[in-house]
Image (cartoon, rainbow, N blue to C red):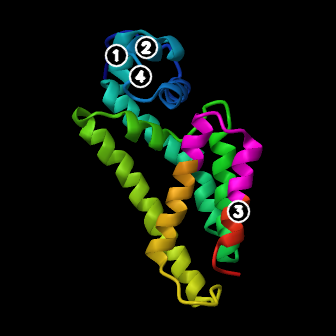
Amino acid sequence: MENVAVRGRPREFDVDDALAAALRVFWTNGYEGSSLTDLTDAMGITRPSLYAAFGNKEELFTRALDLYEREKLAYIREALDAPTTKGMVANLLHGAIDLVSGDCRGCLGVTATVTCGAEDSSIRQHIEGIAANTHRALVERIEKGISAGDFDAPADPEALANYLKTVLQGLSVQARSGMSRSQLESVAQAAVAIWPSR
């Protein structure tokens, strides 16, 4: 049987590298602040190549978010494995500080949620889905800590998970506003100190 040649020119760039470059642009500028020119320049590709490989800007951002969750938010999964609830909180906050005080300051999810308009509802829903998964994991870990006797007094897993979410988002916003790493660490230390478990 005769081989049929694939039509069109072969892709001349690494899709994973291009996606990582797009992630950095979105992380730095937010969704609406990242133009197609910003993206193609950083990715080293043309607009037709972007469309062929990733679809449109929204689809590219969704894939960048998935990469962000898989790689940059791995510290959350690792923190959940700490032997105590207080250890989990400490690991979670310090992992977040490592993330938000790097070259791309702040959290991509927080930045994107704040900057996305109403017309970007599918993006907002995707971000909220990631946040909901994290929230459920935190609630379950706190419930596990309650069962293990980490808490000396009655504890509300939902309220404590919301408290952690608020602190994490606050660290992101403050990092993006220019707060130093040492200042962020002092916030984390205070949050760990008042965490109501052993």
Question: Which comes sooner in the sequence, label 4 or label 3?
Answer: 4
The first of marks 2 and 3 along the sequence is: 2
Residue that badge 4 annotates: 33
- Marks 1 and 4, how far apart in space? 37 Å
For the image, the number of numbered tags is 4
Under tag 2, what secondary structure? loop
Where is residue 7 drawn, in percent x and y? 31, 12
Q: Nearer the viewer, mark 2 or mark 1?
A: 2
Is residue 187 inside the magenta stretch? yes
Amino acid on which disc 2 is placed = Pro
Q: Secondary structure at mark 3?
A: helix
Which circle marks residue 170 in the picture? none
The secondary structure making up most of the magenta span is: helix
Q: Earlier in the sequence, mark 2 or mark 4?
A: 2
For marks 2 and 1, give the CA distance.
9 Å
Residue 10 numbered tag: 2
Mark drawn on residue 6:
1
Nearer-the-camera pick, 15 or 125:
125
